[in-house]
Image (spheres, rainbow, N blue to C red):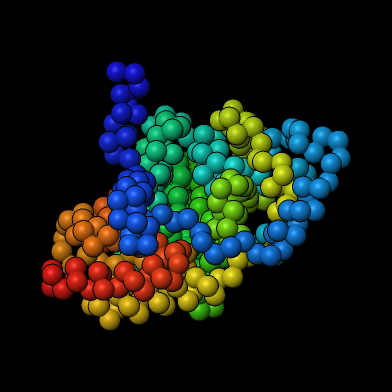
Amino acid sequence: MTIAKKIETFIEKSSWIRKMFEEGTRLKAEHGPEKVFDFSLGNPNVPPPEKFHDVLKTVVEFSGPGVHGYMPNTGYPFVREAVAEYLSGEHRVPLSGDDIIMTCGAAGALNTILKALLDPGDEVLTPTPFFVEYTFYADNHGGSLKTVPTHADFSLDLDAIAGAITPQTKIVLINSPNNPTGQVYPEKDLQGLGALLESRSRALGRTIYLVSDEPYRKIVYDGIDVPSILGVYPDSIVAASYSKDISLAGERLGYIAIHPEASHKPELLAGMTLTNRILGFVNAPALMQRVVAQLQGVTVDVDEYARKRKLLCDGLADAGYDFVWPPGAFYLFPRSPIPDDVEFVRALQAELILVVPGSGFGGPGHFRISYCVDDDTIVNAMPGFKRVIDKYK
């Protein structure tokens, strides 16, 4: 064996998302891309805002000394100040540049946070369904992921979270808007969660951190507001990126925002500054840092995703599917008409429709549809969706 046994095991359990994406590549080569309806990957397809291209051209043309060299591991000071100024208004908490660390996307942010916080045996608690990579991120740093159920509409079950907290719990990790459900956790639930963690932290004599993974924060519909965890709990940390709200997924740029009144804040900042470096990220990409400094508050045309959401949901409702309308992100998480969601996903695959089993997200009996696709993909897949559900109903 040439690779670690753990990694061999992880490969066997690896992401259903990537498996279906790779299957899509095979089917497109066999049948032609226009005949395969690929809803497997959350790869944003709404183009970046026009202002992004204008700023990018300006930044690329600037050739001052050291523009492509190292900067502080936390990122350019002027970029962190720009991010902090914008987030102070968005989260309604006064942040400074010292509370911000620029990272290689939200994934880089989460790994930087977990590396700094986890001791061997510590637990990371997350509600299901959840983003599949969280299991691996926790394991990367000696911790383990422990899941708790949510309500039928995928909202937080605070009683379940309370019952799952143990002396080993170090982090509660939430994702709102959620991947794969699109659910947004309301402020009253976050306030309840903050009060719960404050109480349990005191009882256990150790800080339980609340971490929110927020790459979809600006992709919301119908006037929905995404409440801030920074406003409900001082020992909270936000991990976010520009991958979805500006459609820069391949540029790998994000940030960490630490509550200005967090316990042990100097140690947190020092620890995450170090882990950002020793994980091999060193610093976030210099070019994109300079670009996003001028794009705070700029987003893609979210109305495009709202229109795709309606097109998909109306079509599936007419076909007889059961689902919760997602208030955010660009995913739908319908209920499978049979308990075996993997079998149902394979039946859809026979119609050249690629979706991801809910089991891969800790949500068995469901499947995930990514609707960040061309309208034609949604429209032309509908007859196949109808044929498959009719077969099982």
Question: In the current view of this chain or complex, which residue is farthest to the top?
Answer: 1
* Camera sees residue 332: yes
Quadrant of image for the C terminus: bottom left
Q: Is residue 363 above or below residue 320?
A: above
Q: Residue 206 at what x, y percent from top left?
A: 49, 40
Horizontal and vertical percent for residue 226?
Answer: 54, 67
Q: Position of residue 79 (x, y in %)?
A: 75, 49
Q: Nearer the viewer, residue 92 or 33?
A: 33
Question: Can residue 358 be seen from the camera position used here?
Answer: no
At x 30%, y 51%, the residue is: 30
Relative placement, left or right, of 111 versus 284 is left
**Tag count in the figure?**
0
Q: Quadrant of residue 88?
A: bottom right
Left of 161 or right of it: where is 72?
right
In depth, the one of 188 and 88 nearer the eye is 88
Residue 104 vertical placement versus 319 (above, below): above
Q: In the picture, residue 392 is in which quadrant?
A: bottom left
Name the residue at 70% across, 58% down: 53
- In the image, what residue occupies the spot 27% across and 36% down? 12
* Residue at image location 21% in from the left, 58% down from the top: 350
Q: In the image, residue 273 lies at what x, y percent?
A: 65, 35
